[in-house]
Image (cartoon, grey):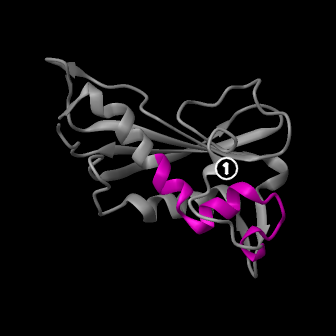
Amino acid sequence: MVKLELLSPNLVQVLNQLIADKEIAKYLFYNQKNPLSQPDIALPATNLMFKNIFPYPFDLTAAVADSTQIRVYYPNGELHNREIIQDSKIVFDIVVAKSLWLVNDGAALLRPYEIMRNIVGLFSDKSVGTVGRINFSRFFHLTVNDKFDAIRLEGNIITFGTS
């Protein structure tokens, strides 16, 4: 269980892991068909925060230009004596303009699935600070609007740190 005061710091730790990953940063920053072949980005890529990485769900009216975004948030939680019960959920929405889905850095791949692969690699089978371990349980496709589609990756946080 975690005290409510750790919800925000834990989510920030997750966001910091995302901006420290070279491949994720390139997939988010570069709109080219070959994002991994582009020049490296200084890490942590803090310039991606609130431009491509957000700690809340997708806003249908926010994005007009082609872009790739990751939205990370807790969809719900169960309160018990002012603490969150362990096994809380966390969601990663990988929102990509339809025109940017296909990439080719030597092989044809799909950008949102490659981002998902990197996210799973970052957090599976390891504890990140006080966040605990994320066991990814499922993913599914979302139609966002006429310009964007998304892959929603859901995970269960097995244990939180305590204060």
Quadrant (top left/top right/bottom left/bottom right) for the C terminus: top left
Residue count near mark 1 (Cα–Cα under 10 Å), binned few <14, some 14–19, many ≥20 = some
Residue at x-position 69% and y-position 60% = 27
Furthest toward the left, the residue is 81
Q: Which stretch is magenta?
A: 15-38
Badge 1 element: helix
Residue at x-position 36% and y-position 61% = 124
The amino acid beneath tag 1 is: Asn
Quadrant (top left/top right/bottom left/bottom right) for the N terminus: top left
Residue under pointer 1: 47
Based on the displayed image, in which of its 4 quarters is residue 5 positioned? top left
Q: Nearer the viewer, residue 69 or 22?
A: 22
Residue 30 is covered by the magenta coloring: yes
Q: In this picture, is 112 found above or below 157? A: below
Based on the displayed image, in which of its 4 quarters is residue 149 positioned? top right
Q: Nearer the viewer, residue 115 or 19?
A: 19
